[in-house]
Each structure stands twice: as C-alpha cells, then as structure tokens.
Image (spheres, rainbow, N blue to C red):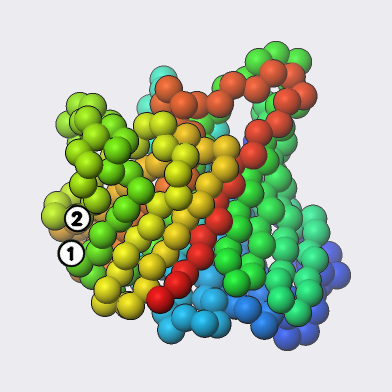
C-alpha cells in the first residue's frame, strides 16, 4: 500500500492562521484545528486524531499515552487509531501488523473546510483493493466517517475499527450503557457470553467484541462529571477494551499506571460482521462522539 508524503509547502495551502495550523513533532507533521466549539489535533500518520476538546467541557475527550511513539511504521497509542483492512492479528500471515495496514502509514490531506463553528478535514489513502477516505468533523461533537471503496473488479472483504481511546477519571468508577442486551465474544477466553441485562463496569482486563450492536453507547464518568455518547452508523460490532495491570506492563508504548485513565469503545465491523463490497461499492463506518454533563 502507499504511504503518502505530502510536502510542507502543499500542506501550507490548507493553513488558516489561528484555525488550521501545521506543526512538526518528532519528525511527524500534525495539524491543530481551532474553532468556536472545540480544538482538535490530527497526525498525517494513520490519519490519527489525537485530541478533541469541546469548549464546553473541562477535560479533553481522548486519552493519549505518555509513552506513545510518534514515528512512521509504528501506531500512535491513544486517540483514534484506524484499524483496517483487518482487526487484531492477520488471519494467516503472522508477520503482518496487528490491526491492519493504515494506522502506521502516512495519509494525504485532500480538503479542509472551516466555518466559525466547525472544521472538517478529508484524508485519503489507497490499499491494494480499496480507496479509503476519512472525513473528520471537529465541532461541538467529533464526527469520524471512514469511507471504503472497492476499486477492484472482484468482491472484497474487510474489517474495520475506529479504535477510540476515551479519557476517564478512573475506569473503576465508570459505567458503560447501551450494550446490556447484546452478546459478546470474550477475546480473552474465546467464549461467547450471552446478554446480561447489566451495564458494563470494569473490574479486570476486558477485551470484548459485542455482536450486532447499532444503538448509541454512553460512558458515564462521575469523576469527570460527564457523559460521553457514541452514536454510530454502518457499524454492527463494538469492541470494549481495557488492558488492566499486567497487560499494561507488557505494552512498551503504554505507561504501567495509565490503564485507569482510559477505556476503548470501538465503532467496528469485525469477525462475522466484516463487510463485503462488490466492485465499485462503498461503505461508511461513522462514529459521532458527544459530551454532556
Ligand atoms: C483492542 C483489541 O481492540 O486493541 C485488543 O481487542 C488489543 O486485543 C488492543 O490488545 C490493542 O491493540 P494494539 O495492537 O494497539 O496493541
């Protein structure tokens, strides 16, 4: 697949002082957006959104690890990695990177549209079988829309996850609602667990793929006095993950004591809910994140 390296001069054509500005960090280029509703940040590496902070809230929405790597070929830990065209380990190639190809590649910025109230950016990438276009709207809400277009002349299948890391006051005290009546595949045991009727409360390492879920999900975080709502379209799976203590220690790009400050709720289509696209067909996976008190 291609890794696009856009020149600094080309990126400057999208720049609007005070609203859309480009900066360098450890050899990577990121873009800082500012409008009346929020501020945000994304890297060209992985089209990775690393910050979204609506002005009506005290805390930023997204968790970023202090141990995150910022270099091409390595994914960024935190924010919103894009997992595509497979999720988790590759089916047959054990040397292929986990979670697909695009989170460690450079994307190209194609468009920036801004008003006083919102900033919308479009980033693109091409893999062997697909054209991928990612539209992110930084406004009072954060909308992420990943469009996948089958550019071949045969049916193609893919998995996808918008692997959002949410910043929490303390994972021990948050409650996740919206998945009470949904069965899940426990990735730690390989078992399918039936619906419980109970909201999720984290008490240990958690790695679950909820199946057939299209309803909005809400994270209630009493410590930050806020509720985060995730609405989705074109996504039938939801992944819920927290590494807890031991796995946190095993991850080189994640601090040993950071696990209470995050959880991932991923807007996805994985496993049996992978998407099949006919030639020239397109699919959108959309997540809209909002915060209220
Ligand atoms: C989650 C998976 O989506 O991502 C977990 O369900 C995995 O199994 C986690 O550990 C992090 O993956 P990575 O490749 O970013 O370390």
> In terms of sequence position, does the residue under pointer 1 or pointer 2 come before the other?
1
- Is residue 190 rendered to the left or right of residue 238? left
Q: Residues within 10 Å of mark 1 (few under 14, many from 20)?
A: some
- Is residue 144 rendered to the left or right of residue 191? right
At 38% across and 68% down in the image, what residue appears?
227
Residues 282 and 2: in front is: 282
The residue indicated by pointer 2 is: 202
Q: Quadrant of the N terminus?
A: top right
Q: Is residue 199 visible?
A: yes
Q: Is residue 206 above or below residue 63?
A: above
Q: Position of residue 287 (x, y in %)?
A: 54, 51
- Is residue 217 rendered to the left or right of residue 233? left
Q: Are marks 1 and 2 in contact (CB under 8 Å)?
A: yes
At 80% across and 59% down in the image, what residue appears?
111
The residue indicated by pointer 1 is: 172
At 64% across and 70% down in the image, what residue appears?
139
Q: Report whether the residue tagged 1 is closer than 8 Å to ligand 1.
A: no
Q: CA distance from mark 1 to mark 2?
A: 6 Å
Q: Residues within 10 Å of mark 2 (few under 14, many from 20)?
A: some
Q: Is residue 184 above or below residue 248?
A: above
Q: Position of residue 57 (x, y in %)?
A: 47, 81
């Amino acid at each position: 697949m291609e890794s696009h390296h856009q020149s600094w001069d080309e990126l400057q054509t999208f720049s609007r002082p005070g609203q859309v500005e480009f900066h360098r960090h450890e050899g990577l280029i990121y873009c800082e957006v500012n409008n009346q509703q929020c501020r945000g940040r994304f890297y060209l590496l992985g089209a990775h959104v690393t910050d979204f902070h609506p002005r009506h809230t005290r805390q930023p929405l997204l968790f970023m690890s202090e141990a995150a790597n910022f270099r091409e070929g390595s994914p960024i830990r935190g924010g919103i990695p894009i997992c595509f065209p497979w999720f988790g380990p590759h089916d047959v190639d054990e040397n292929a990177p986990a979670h697909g190809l695009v989170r460690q590649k450079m994307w190209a910025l194609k468009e920036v549209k801004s008003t006083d109230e919102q900033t919308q950016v479009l980033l693109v990438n091409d893999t062997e079988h697909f054209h991928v276009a990612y539209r992110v709207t930084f406004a009072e809400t954060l909308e992420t829309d990943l469009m996948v277009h089958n550019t071949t002349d045969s049916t193609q299948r893919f998995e996808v996850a918008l692997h959002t890391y949410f910043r929490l006051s303390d994972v021990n005290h948050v409650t996740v609602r919206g998945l009470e009546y949904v069965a899940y595949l426990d990735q730690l045991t390989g078992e399918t667990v039936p619906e419980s009727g109970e909201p999720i409360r984290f008490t240990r390492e958690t790695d679950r793929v909820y199946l057939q879920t299209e309803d909005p999900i809400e994270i209630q975080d009493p410590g930050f006095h806020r509720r985060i709502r995730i609405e989705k379209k074109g996504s039938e799976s939801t992944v819920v993950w927290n590494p807890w203590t031991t796995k946190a220690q095993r991850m080189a790009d994640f601090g040993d004591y950071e696990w209470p400050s995050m959880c991932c709720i991923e807007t996805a289509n994985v496993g049996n809910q992978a998407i099949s696209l006919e030639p020239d067909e397109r699919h959108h996976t959309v997540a809209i994140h909002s915060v209220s008190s």
